[in-house]
Image (cartoon, rainbow, N blue to C red):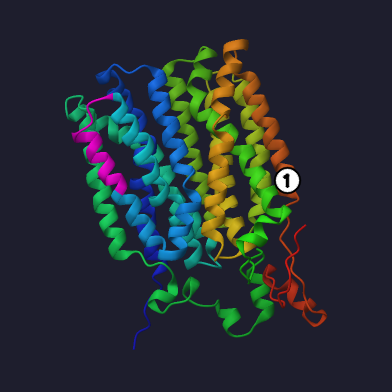
Amino acid sequence: MKERSFYGWRLLVCFWIVLFVNLALPLYGAGVINAQMARAFGLDHKTVGIAFMLFSLFSGLPGPLVAIVCNRFGVRASIVLGGGMLTLSSLVLGLLVTSPWQAILMFGVVSGTAVAFGGLIPVQTGAVQWFNRNRARAVSIVLTGVGAGGFASPILMQQVIRLSGDNWRAAWIVIAVLSGITTLGAGIFVRNQPSDIGQLPDGGPAPAAARGDAASAAVRSTVYVSSVDWTVREVLRSGLFWRIMVASVCFMCGVVTMLAHGVLHFESLNYSAAQSASALGVLMLCSLLAKGATGIIGDRVEPRTMWCAAMLVFAAGFVLTAKAQGNYGPYIATGAIGLAYGFSYVSLMVLVGNYFGKKPYASLVGIIWSIITISTALAPVLAGIAFDRLRSYALPFYVAAGLCMAGCGLVFFATPPRRGVRATDQTDRSMAGRDTAAVSEPDLR
């Protein structure tokens, strides 16, 4: 009887489409749609900003609740719930919204919550559940869906609006249709974990491991992957988790500031609107390339090492942004930031799974996103205040560079956690970077 092929690789295709449609389209395409909607309703920039602020908050704050759904009912249930909410909110925006407060409610609150339940947390959790040896590759593959969607969504939404006679409602209807199809497909094809269909992570143990060839296995894998699952309480008591958490906030503050003020900053340096906008396109493209590259090397090189290097590139990118010069200055700066963001984000998400195991993963990612959302909410506001007082964005970007340098130090010292081992098991600790020893209490340094 022919052995069934490993389903995980086909599942990644489904996850990729989910992130492209249910996350990237409403997140990156809304900038184009809401600009048209604002003109139609006569909205000021403050009102549009409130809608985006609510969207950002509600796409991150429900993280712990999303984790509960993933843990109790599975990632498929979370994706279907979020996709259904996005389909509904997009239909309402496209067909029924007639006032600014309705638009703010449906886009900021309902669509934001939909993205939380149907986006990154369940998809990343699913990838971690299905892969051990190839975890970095799996996570990076699905995250390229966000990068591809970020690059394509504004162009796609602009074309839909143009072809419909400048009708912004048509763009929301297109999102509703695509989301509905994607959600239906996810309900049919997504499986929560390999055991649901009688399979093992990665399709089974590596050939060397299956033969008991410890030396070969050690050569093949040099990345630390915990063989035990921590409890959420243990993780939250560890200084290691909070070093990782603070480091992630350090680079996300700069990224959010760049997305909110990058175009205005380059325009203040006398670059054209077209140059300033295309610089952000370079950021998204380089982020996409970096996420793909992480998948090639992320299962052979420690994610911590990649993240450290990326934080240094981040710092250089923000300094170059602050003092951009010449025709290619903005593109070099945003290209560096995009590369650093792609490597940093994938490394962060893989590191959490590698260090603490699969069972607490959804809960930890939910906590991380909630804290990032709260911690970075004021970054664009403070950058705007700095510009109003100094007539320059240089200071906020220099501060972002400094934060990334500090974050680099935190990541450098975020070494793999150690658990108690028996003396007879000391030799096993060097095998494949994995802790195969007996489990006692975690080292909560």
> Residue 196 lies in magenta, yes or no?
no
Locate residue 442, reporting x and y percent: 73, 66
Q: As displayed, is residue 393 above or below residue 223?
A: above
Q: Which residues are magenta?
A: 85-99
From the viewer's perspective, tell me whether residue 64 is left or right of residue 181: right
**Front-lying residue, 200 or 273:** 200
Characterize the local packing of mark 1: few (<14), some (14-19) or many (20 or more) Cα atoms within 10 angstroms: many
The dominant secondary structure in magenta is helix
Per the image, the residue denoted by label 1 is 410
Q: Residue at x 68, y 38 (%)?
A: 312
> Residue 92 lies in magenta, yes or no?
yes
Q: Residue at x 39, y 29 (%)?
A: 51
Q: Could you say whether the residue bearing mark 1 is in a helix, strand or loop?
A: helix
On the question of residue 336 being in view, the answer is no
Which image quarter is the N terminus in? bottom left
Which image quarter is the C terminus in? bottom right
From the viewer's perspective, tell me whether residue 375 is left or right of residue 414: left
**Front-lying residue, 153 or 396:** 396
Q: Quadrant of residue 92?
A: top left
